[in-house]
Amino acid sequence: MTEQKIKKVVIVGGGTAGWITASLLAKVLGKVLDITLVESDKIGTIGVGEATIPPILHFNAAIGLDEQEFLKATKGTIKLGIEFDHWGKQGDSYMHAFGGIGKNFPFCDFHHFYLKVKQHNIKADFWQYSLNYQAAKHNKFAKLNQLPNTNLPGITYAYHFDAGLYAKHLRTFSEKMGVKRIEGTINKVHQAESTGFIHSVQLENEQIITGDLFIDCTGLSALLIEKTFSVGFEDYSHWLPCDRAMAVPSERIDPIIPYTKAIAHAHGWQWRIPLQHRTGNGLVYSSKHLSDEKAKSLLLKNLDATPLEEPRIIAFKTGRRRKQWHRNVVAIGLSSGFFEPLESTNIHLIQSAATRLLKCFPHQGIKEEDVNEFNRQAKIESEQMRDFIILHYKLTQRDDSNFWRECQRMEVPESLMRKMALFAQTGKVFREQDELFTEIAWQQVMIGQGLIPKDYHPLVDSLSQQQLDDLMNNLKTIIDKTVEKMPSHNEFLTQLSKPKFV
C-alpha cells in the first residue's frame, strides 16, 4: 500500500479511547514514534463506560499504572461481576460472576456435576460454589490469588471508575512519556490525490498537523473512518434493539457494593454502577417502544438516591464499521462501532484494538497484509461479543411487553443458535479461538436465564452419590469460610488513602 516508514502518529480525539491508545503506544513505541493527540475541550465525551472486565488489570499493568494511584485518581471501586435482575422472568436474579465456579475436572467442567445435583434438588444454587458471587453478595473483597490451603483459584476482579477521570489520569501519564497534546477542533481533512491516504488535518485556527498514521478516536461522529472514507457500517440493531441510553449520576449509597447491577424493565434495562463518590445510573431502551420523556421518568423513579444532575440522552446504533483499518486510518473506540454497555465491553474493546494495532503496527510502510489481518481479527471479536450480548435478550421468558416478546421471537445468528442448541441438549459449551467470554460466562447466563441442559457429561457418574455430595459440601464450606474472613469492600476502599494497601 505504501513504502513510507511510519514515524509520526496522530490520534484524532481524546477521551478514554484517545488516551488509552496514546498511553499504550507511548509506553511500547515511544522511543521510535512521534505521537500527537488532537482534542477539543468543546467536544464532550460519552462517558458511560464506568464498568470494566478483568482484562483491564493486564492492560493497566502493561503500561505501568500503579493500582492504588489509579483507584484514587478515578474514584474507583471493585467489580466482582454483574447481577442481572428480571432478565429470565420478572423476579429472577443471577450473576455473571468473574472467576471460576466450583472445581473443574479434566475434560469436564464443574457445572456438569451441578446439573446432576439439580436433577435431584430443583432448588440447587449454582452460585453457592462461586467465590466471586459469595464475596459480592456479602460486600466483601480481598486480593486473593488462591483459596487458602487449596489449589483453587481465588478472586478475579475488575473495576468501576469515572471514565472521564480515567482519561485524565492517562493523559497525565501519556504526556510524561512524551505524547504531545494539541487543543483544537478539526475542520478539514487533507488526502493525497495519488493514494487517498490522509496526509494532514487542519484546525479551525488553520494550524495543519501532518502524520503518517492517523487514529480515529472521534467517537460516534467517526470523522476519519466514516465521514472521510465511508467504509460502511454493519448494523446489529435487528438483534440488539435498544438504540438509546439515558444517563444520570446520583449520590453515593453505603455500603458500596462490589458489583454492577443490570435491571431489566419492560422496554430495556437499567444499569447501576457504584463509585467512591457517586453512583452511575443509566437506562438503555428502545425508542420504538419507549419515548424519551417516559424513559426519563422511569429512570428517575428507579434511582435509589438523589440525582446529581439532569439526565442526558445518548442515541446510538449497535454494530461495527466494515473496516476498522482503512488506508492509513485506524478507528478505535466508538468510531469503530458500538455495543450497548450490557456486559461492560466498550472500554475493553478500546484496549483490545489498541493492543491489536500494536501487534500489527506497520514499520516500513503500511502493508495490505497487516491491514487485512487487523480487520479479520476485529470482525471475529465483534461477532463473538455480539452473540454473547444477544444471548441475554433471546433467552428471556418475559411476556409483559412487545419489546421482550419480539426478543424471544427474533432469529439469531447461526453461530449463537448452534451454541445454545449444544448446551440445551448436552450441557457442553466451548470457547472458540481467543473469544473474550469464557465457558463459565456462557454457563452462567444460560443457566441463570433458565436454559437448563437435558443431559450432563458421563464423567459425573464416575462419582458415587456420597462422593458427589462430599465434593459439593466441601466446596461450599471452603468458599463460605473464605468469604467470612474477608474484609468488607468499604474497608478495602478506606485503605486507599493510606500509604500502601495489599
Image (tube, helix red, strand yellow):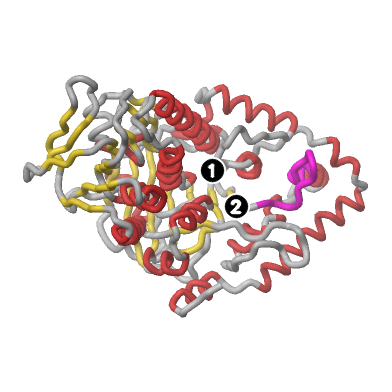
Q: Is residue 215 left or right of residue 262?
A: left
The part of the image, by quadrant, that contains residue 226 is: top left
Q: Which residue is mark 1?
A: 87
Q: Position of residue 197 (x, y in %)?
A: 24, 27
Disc 2 residue type (three-letter): Ala
Question: Could you tell me which quadrant the N terminus lies in?
Answer: top left
Q: Do residues under tags 2 and 1 come within 8 Å of each other at their CB atoms?
A: no
Determine which quarter of the picture holds residue 245.
Answer: top left
Identify the element where label 1 is drawn: loop
Rendered location of residue 84, percent (x, y) = 54, 49
Q: Which one is nearer the viewer's eye here, 188 or 94?
A: 188
Of all residues shown, which one is farthest toward the left? 205
- Determine if the magenta segment contains residue 112: yes
Disc 2/disc 1 C-alpha distance (Å): 16 Å
- Give the SS element for disc 2: strand
At horizontal 33% and vertical 34% (from top left) the residue drawn is: 330
User: Magenta residues: mostly which secondary structure?
Assistant: loop
Residue 266 in sight: no
Magenta segment boundaries in residue numbering = 100-115
Q: Which mark is residue 97?
A: 2
Question: Does label 2 or label 1 sit earlier along the sequence?
Answer: 1
Instruction: Return the x and y of residue 49 as percentages of the image width and height.
Output: 39, 50
2 lies above or below 391: above
User: Looking at the image, is 9 positioned above or below residue 279?
Assistant: above
